[in-house]
Amino acid sequence: MSASGDAAARLIDDGAAAVAAAVRDGRMKSEDVFAAALGRVRDTHVAGDSLNAVLAVASADDALEGRRAGALAGVPVAVKDNIATLTLPTGCASRILSGWVSPYEATVVRKLRDAGAVVVGKTNMDEFAMGSSTENSAYGPSLNPLDRTRVPGGSSGGSAVAVAAGIAPIALGSETGGSVRQPAAFCGIVGVKPTYGRVSRFGLVAFASSLDAVGVFGRTVDDAALGTEIISGHDVNDSTSSVREVPSMQAAAGRLDGLVVGVPKEYFPESLPQGMRDRCERALEALRSRGATTREVSLPHTSLAIPVYYIIAPAEASANLARFDGVRYGMRMEGEGVREMYEATRANGFGPEVTRRILLGTYVLSAGYYDAYYRKAQEVRALIARDFERVFADGVDLLFTPTTPSPAFKLGAISDPYEMYLSDIFTVTANLAGIPAMSLPIGRVDGLPVGGQLLANHFAEPVMFRAAYALEDALGMEAHK
Amino acid sequence: MAVTPDDVRHVAQLARLGIPDATLATYVEQLNGILLHMDALQAVPTSGAAAEAEAEAAGMRLRADSPGPVPLATAREKFAPRMLDGFFLVPRLATHEDAGEES
């Protein structure tokens, strides 16, 4: 690599703000940063030894046009394959949408481009965002860059790997039950799920519309805060997006005097590995060292979150994915008459996990079962949200938990669907309640990253980020040991 | 509420999914395994929560139902150059009675 290429690659490692400042000042060309990012894609996608994180890369002409100004001037970003981009395919890592190019662009992508960012490519994922390991992709699994025998998490595994492997300092993912925070924890980076409504979903291929959110990966809290702030805000094309003003999410790592951090006992079960428990305790001590106080709280309906989630999400998915029928999008299989064509197309186009969830969702919505499953799940969802409301009304500003119940697991280690669903147990509650949450690295166990999760009240992202900056600063290199 | 092979066939038909007989038993077993865990919800008292859940849904804010421009990759004029009173003008299909004429 040339000297300028080396410098550009180092700049990516320094973070988004450093890249943007260098490009704006003219110290670095956006073309060189883009070339360095593509070089990292090539280095990590060698045949026979590929992380399999990036499914498609942008051409230089398309990527670089006018990217020399703005808060993200020349910053490479990677985008999950279920977020619509012009010119690059948006296939949701599914056979049924293979090679499909959207006629319009997602609002979040447009906002990144308007801020000067350069879309490097589209990233691998669990098909239609259904999974927790990126093993459900039609293009094969992505690998965890820290241990290639393990999963990177999912469903936004490709975006997490792109950031962890230094391809881009910022990447977009999507969350329905933890699909940004869980892979962030497994790959040792930062992952943010904003408040439901904080960020437009226009151009995000719908999975479960009452739960879906676009999320942001960053190598550091600052990268994640910057990316989240830029994509936030009202969008006339998404009636569920909030009209609230977008506050500044970047902050200095300062004191946390007066901040009350709740520690929900339900997120520290006996089954939590001792090493992870120790890292969490160290992180809580770091928060206390910056002036925060911590206290145990209870969220009594937590254990019901997985059953609730796996009724509501498949129910909504079964409706949202009805549009993929061989007529309007993507592939088509021939059949005798239109019904056979539909059935053949969907049977061949969807993988096993998507098929399973469509069947499950259709079942819980069908006559005779709607009240017992779907209506009941919606009622319990309200109780889960009420748990959070009660705690925040009782003087707690933030909650701290482990992000996952275990570190990254081995590829192929989990074959039982419900066992896989349980890996989301600490993250689905934020989606059900609609509150913001993020994961950041707090240490390692046996060389594998451990994520600590911060959860805040609706639209309280600034408080969440303020604590995250302080925690990251207080832990320093301990966060990666 | 055990799921039977007929249940899976029925919901597959509703969902327009072709399920080969060879995989039917697997889906029956998996759906039963998953739904077993959902039964925990039945024991939860939820009086009052139903009204709350419905009130939240009813409070959804909607924008005015009026058309607006959507930025497209290809300008509309390129793929639909002819319009009349807000409708696209297209060639008549061969299946129309008076095929050959253009509207």
Image (tube, rainbow, N blue to C red):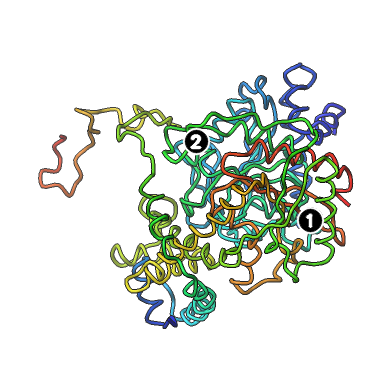
Which of A301 and A174 lies nearest the eye of the viewer?
A301
Q: Which residue is mark 1?
A: A450
Location of residue B45 in the rendering, given as x and y in whole percent from the top left corner: 47, 69
Location of residue A422 in the rendering, given as x and y in whole percent from the top left corner: 63, 67
Q: Is residue A227 left or right of residue A103?
A: right
Which of A18 and B49 lies nearest the eye of the viewer?
B49
Q: Quadrant of residue A12?
A: top right
Question: In terms of sequence position, does the residue under pointer 2 or pointer 1 come before the other?
Answer: 2
Disc 2 element:
loop
Which of A298 and A335 lies nearest the eye of the viewer?
A298
The answer as to whether the residues below labels 2 and 1 share one chain is yes
Q: Is residue B39 left or right of residue A47?
A: left
Report the chain holding disc 1. A
Q: Is residue A414 above or below residue A162?
A: below
Q: Would you call the spot at circle 1 few (<14 residues within 10 Å), some (14-19), or many (20 or more)?
A: many
Location of residue A63 in the rendering, given as x and y in whole percent from the top left corner: 62, 30
Tell me the amino acid under the disc marked 1. Answer: Val
Tell me the amino acid under the disc marked 2. Answer: Glu
**Quadrant of the image for the N terminus of chain A?**
top right
